[in-house]
Amino acid sequence: MSALARVLVVDDSPTMRGLISAVLKADPEVEVVGQAGNAMEARAAIKQLNPDVVTLDIEMPEMNGLEFLEKIMRLRPMPVIMVSSLTHRGADASLAALEIGAFDCVGKPAPGDARPFGDLADKVRRLPARSTRPIARRAPKPLPPRSRPRSAITAPAARSWPSAPPRAVSRR
């Protein structure tokens, strides 16, 4: 039997944290190790609890989920599954989250959904502990244009000796 997937649930709504936790706890291979209501609580919980997976809402007070996701991916990369009403299939928020480095996105349930949170527990369970999936990042800003590298700078050949090869110039 595989080890339990340890999950931290981050959502500003206590009701939603309870629903997500209940769905995850129903799976015997998933353990909810903690909950957080905002990014600062989540940061402290990640340090203290060392979860394998974080579920993260986008709309939160103080720092939204996409900003916090970017910090997680830069400072302590780990599998994150976005759980938000803004992350339905093909939504701009989903694409932005995946680009930053989220492992997957799950939409919050609408009233009357037969299976709230879809296959969230399956997604969490299938994630290997400390996933080594390459983290998608935004393309780095281009560096300002420079002339050729120092090693490529050459002095022109002397005019009186046209057959002389160019010589390297040291700029130390």
Image: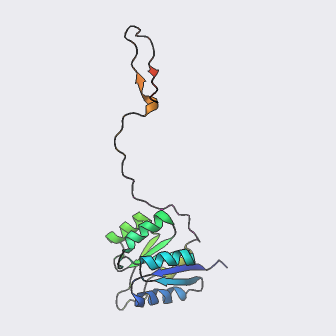
**Residue 123 visible within the image:** no
Q: 133 or 137: which is nearer to us? A: 137
Q: Residue at x 34, y 91 (%)?
A: 111
Q: Please, is residue 166 above or below residue 45 in the view? A: above
Which residue is nearer to you in this view: 134 or 166?
166
Seen at 41% across and 8% down, the residue is 161
Near-viewer residue (121 or 62): 62
* Furthest residue toward front: 172
Picture coordinates of residue 10 (x, y %)?
45, 80
Q: Which residues are magenta?
A: 128-142
Determine the image quadrant of residue 28.
bottom right
74 is within the stretch colored magenta? no
**Depicted 104 relative to depicted 169: above or below:** below
Residue 163 location, quadrant: top left
Residue 33 percent coordinates (x, y) = 55, 83
The residue lying toward the viewer, choosing from 114 and 10, is 10
Image quarter (top left, top right, bottom left or bottom right) of the N terminus? bottom right
Q: Could you tell me if residue 73 is visible in this image?
A: yes
Left or right, residue 62 beside residue 34: left
Numbered marks: total = 0
Q: Is residue 33 left or right of residue 94?
A: right
- Residue 22: percent from left, percent from top: 49, 90
Q: Residue furthest left?
A: 92
Residue situated furthest right in the rendering? 1
Q: Position of residue 94 (x, y in %)?
A: 37, 71
